[in-house]
Structure formats: C-alpha cells, structure tokens
Amino acid sequence: MDVKYGPSVGKAAIGGPFKLVNHEGKTVTEKDFLGNWTLMYFGFTSCPDICPDELQKMVQAIDAVDKKSGLKIAPLFVSVDPERDSVEQMKEYVQEFHPRLVGLTGAPEDIKQVAKSFRVYYMKTGDEGDDYLVDHSIIMYLMDPKMEFVNFFGKNYTVDELSQGIMDEVKSHGKTKRS
C-alpha cells in the first residue's frame, strides 16, 4: 500500500518555557536543558505500575541509544502530583531508575502550566486525603537540543522501538550532541 503524504503545516505547538525545581532542590528552566536531546515523561512517584514501567523503558532506551550511537539523551521525569512529590520524594524515586534521570516538581500552578504547554492531561482520582491516584497522559516527548518538540512516543512502544525511534529522529535532524 502506497502512502501519500500531504503538505506539512508546521510544527506541533508542544512544549515551551517552564520553571520547576529539580530533585536536588535547584530551580531550573527549559534553558538548563539546551544543547542536549531530551526525553520527557510526566507521571507521579506514587504511581503503582504504569510510571515505573514507562520510566524503566525510558532509561533502557536511552542506554541503548548511548551504546549504539554514543549520544547521551537527557531523561526528565516531570511530576503531575506536586502535593506529594516533594524534592526529597523525587530524589529518592529517580535514584531507583538511572543516575542521569532528572526529577522535576514544583508548585501546583507551575506543574499546571508545564503540563498545559506539553498538552498533558492529568487529574486526581479517588481523592480521599493522601490516598489517591492521578490519571494522566502516558507519553514520552523527544525534544531537540533547542528544547523544541520533535516527536512523541506512546505506551505501545517497546524499548527497541523507542530507542530506534529516537535515533531515527536524531539522524533526520542531522545533528547530534555528544555530552
């Protein structure tokens, strides 16, 4: 089957400026990640299964990209549960996955702003005190070295498909930054 592609109408309006706090307690913005390819995932540390599975897939994929191409992708985990995901909680959580994984949290209004700019859906469910889950989008966002959106990868990608998809996108952009 031949696929016919129509004209492109521009880039998706995904991403933008943000100001959050990393898992070391330092205030960071999108500018702190300029110069590197970045893979972002939005979730929460109390997530029972999906977030840990997706973060494990993320870090395995970035390690595979590094091994195959020497490119070190910067992995970011952005909390959609700022009420429970303190700096200390994020630090403890990200250490379980990868030494380069950066956890980002912040004030509820800052999380709302970054989620909106990335078109991330999230909502508390079963709100009974601190015993609740957060329903959210299950998507990883690949950002180029200018922190501009390149592509997204959903839950259906395997580690191999994710790492190959990242390498294909980097190659099609013609630039790799080795850090």
Image (cartoon, rainbow, N blue to C red):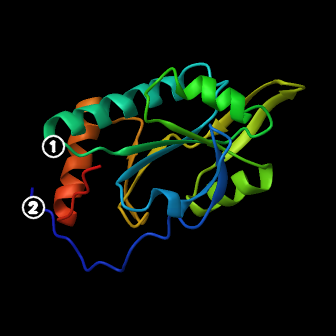
Please, what secondary structure does the residue beneath circle 1 have?
A: helix
Badge 2 amino acid: Asp
Does residue 84 sit above or below 170 in this rendering?
A: above
Please, what secondary structure does the residue beneath circle 2 have?
A: loop
Tell me if residue 158 can be seen: no
- Which mark, residue 89? none
Where residue 121 appears, as percent x and y from the top left, is 63, 49
Which of 136/7 is in front?
A: 136
Residue under numbered circle 1: 69
Where residue 54 appears, as percent x and y from the top left, is 45, 30
**Going by the image, does 118 lie left or right of 86?**
left
Where residue 9 appears, as percent x and y from the top left, is 35, 80
Does residue 131 sit above or below 177 in this rendering?
A: above
The tag earlier along the polypeptide, 2 or 1, is 2
Residue 135: image quadrant is top right
**Going by the image, does 115 lie left or right of 38?**
right
- Which mark, residue 2? 2
Which residue lies at the image location 74% right of the left edge and 34% below the top edge?
A: 86
Residue that protrudes farthest toward the left in the picture: 1
